[in-house]
Amino acid sequence: MSSENRSHFSASALVRKLDEISRYYAFLLAKTADTKGWAKDE
């Protein structure tokens, strides 16, 4: 039982970390696009 709980926790922790990373990359991409003027196409 305890190992199952641990794997569930690590899975949710991984999801949280992935969400953090994807949000960071989205911010980075938006910043880069803004700097290079790509955002002005819209």
Image (spheres, grey):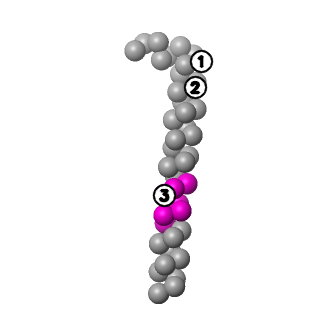
User: CB under 8 Å between callouts 2 and 1?
Assistant: yes
Q: Secondary structure at mark 2?
A: helix
Would residue 15 appear left or right of 31 to someone viewing this image? left
Residue at mark 1: 35
Q: Quadrant of the C terminus?
A: top left
The secondary element bearing badge 3 is classed as helix
Report how far apart the C-alphas of labels 3 and 1 lie in the structure: 30 Å
User: Which secondary structure dominates the residues rendered in magenta?
Assistant: helix
Name the residue rendered at 51%, 56% in the picture. 16
Residue for badge 3: 15
> Which span is picked out in magenta?
11-17
- Report the amino acid beneath label 2: Lys
Precedes in sequence: disc 3 or disc 2: 3
- Give residue 31's position: percent from left, percent from top: 57, 25
Depicted 17 relative to depicted 2: above or below: above
Residue drawn at x 58%, y 24% as measured from the top left: 32
The percent coordinates of residue 34 (x first, y second) are: 55, 19
Query: Any magenta on residue 12?
Result: yes
